[in-house]
Amino acid sequence: MLKQILNRIPKKGSKSAENNEGGGGGTSTSSSSSNSVRSSSYGNSTASGVDSNSSIGGDILVQAMNSKLNLNGSLSASYEALPSFRDVPSSEKPNLFIRKLQMCCVLFDYTDPSKNIKEKEIKRQTLVELVDYVSSANGKFTDVMMQEIVKTVSINLFRTLTTPPRENKILEAFDMDEEEPSMDPAWPYLQIVYELLLRFVTSPETDAKLAKRYVDHSFVLRLLDLFDSEDPRERDYLKTVLHRIYGKFMVHRPFIRKAINNIFYRFIFETEKHNGIAELLEILGSIINGFALPLKEEHKLFLVRALIPLHKPKCIPMYHQQLSYCITQFVEKDCKLADTIIRGLLKYWPITNSSKEVMFLGELEEVLEATQPAEFQKCMVLLFHQIRRCLSSSHFQDSLSAFLVDFQSV
């Protein structure tokens, strides 16, 4: 009897093994689980079910991508011009304004002029209408209207800038004005969006206390990122817009100055590559001009930590004129800063670059014109040593510029 029981045990085990390996149906949970695992591994019926699920998920992704790619075809029927503001009653204009803003949130590929010609023109005309509406507004913009304006502007302007790689020789060259600037093919449309933003910021119907919820720190930072655009037309508009924002939103002024400082720090000490340094300095020149006296310690630190070190990068010709103006503004505001500035110039004085030396000498002359005798005496020994080196230079232009530096005004 015991022998018969013992003989039966391995027979049950072998049947279980056969069921597991052969994929046969079993009644136990463990057997079913084993079947699922093995059939998935060896490509049986359960495996084909998983593949079909993956295929469905892939099809969904492909359809989503195709819908985006085929957006050009589907827009023709749905992207139609809305009625003009002239054709609707005054009570309906605010709602129509919002609908037009939402309509302009649709983006097109402007690198291919043959795509969506009709839709692009509809969007352009709609943007022009929006600019006219904002310019002629005779009532305060509502919270919803301001939100939609900033949303439309953000969607159209804030994008990843494509900057072509620069060679080192370009950065070191001093004929950068001859370099061909990169023009954005979308500029005819971007320009109208910038104009819309500018009219909105400068409009007397824009309440700064309400608008600051949307023209916030995040918006300002993303606007500052665009200063690295290759297109000089865009940087010029950005300069005007940011200056107006600085003037209107007093609460943002410290933040804007700090954000510009950070751009300068990154440029000076990390990358030495940025397209908008000249425009940012031009804005700062106007800001410095409006500084109240006596100068705050924050402003003096900005001079020492950012403006003076901007003489270090090799590509200084790109922005030297604007930098020199900012430096001179500080001396005219506080003559006691002359010693600090002159010593800073001497610290970053070029050794082997004669063209850069000529620029430094020109800036030095402007600083000396605003320098008082007491401040001049603090640094005159170091200064005369540098002038002597320039006079003994083999480069004629250096010698001539050093000779022409006028000390009679000191």
Image (tube, rainbow, N blue to C red):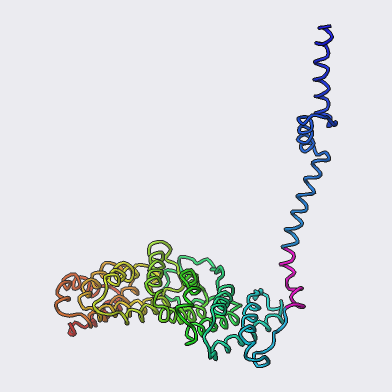
**In the image, farthest residue toward the front:** 91
Residue 67: in magenta span: yes
Q: Main secondary structure of the magenta part?
A: helix
Q: Position of residue 105 (x, y in %)?
A: 63, 75
Q: Nearer the viewer, residue 232 or 82?
A: 82
Q: Position of residue 351 (x, y in %)?
A: 30, 67
Q: Is residue 342 above or below residue 203?
A: above
Q: Quadrant of residue 369?
A: bottom left
Q: Nearer the viewer, residue 170 or 278?
A: 278
Q: Nearer the viewer, residue 268 or 70?
A: 70
Q: Quadrant of residue 10?
A: top right
The span shown in magenta is 65-78
Residue appearing at x 18%, y 72% in the figure: 379
Which image quarter holds the N terminus?
Answer: top right
Which image quarter holds the C terminus?
Answer: bottom left
Q: Quadrant of residue 283?
A: bottom left
Q: Is residue 18 above or below residue 314?
A: above
**In the image, farthest residue toward the bottom:** 86
Residue appearing at x 45%, y 75% in the figure: 176
Residue 139: in magenta span: no
Q: Position of residue 375 (x, y in %)?
A: 17, 75
Q: Nearer the viewer, residue 271 or 249?
A: 249
Q: Is residue 396 visible?
A: no
Q: Is residue 208 visible?
A: yes
Q: Position of residue 109 (x, y in %)?
A: 66, 73
Q: Is residue 23 left or right of residue 339?
A: right
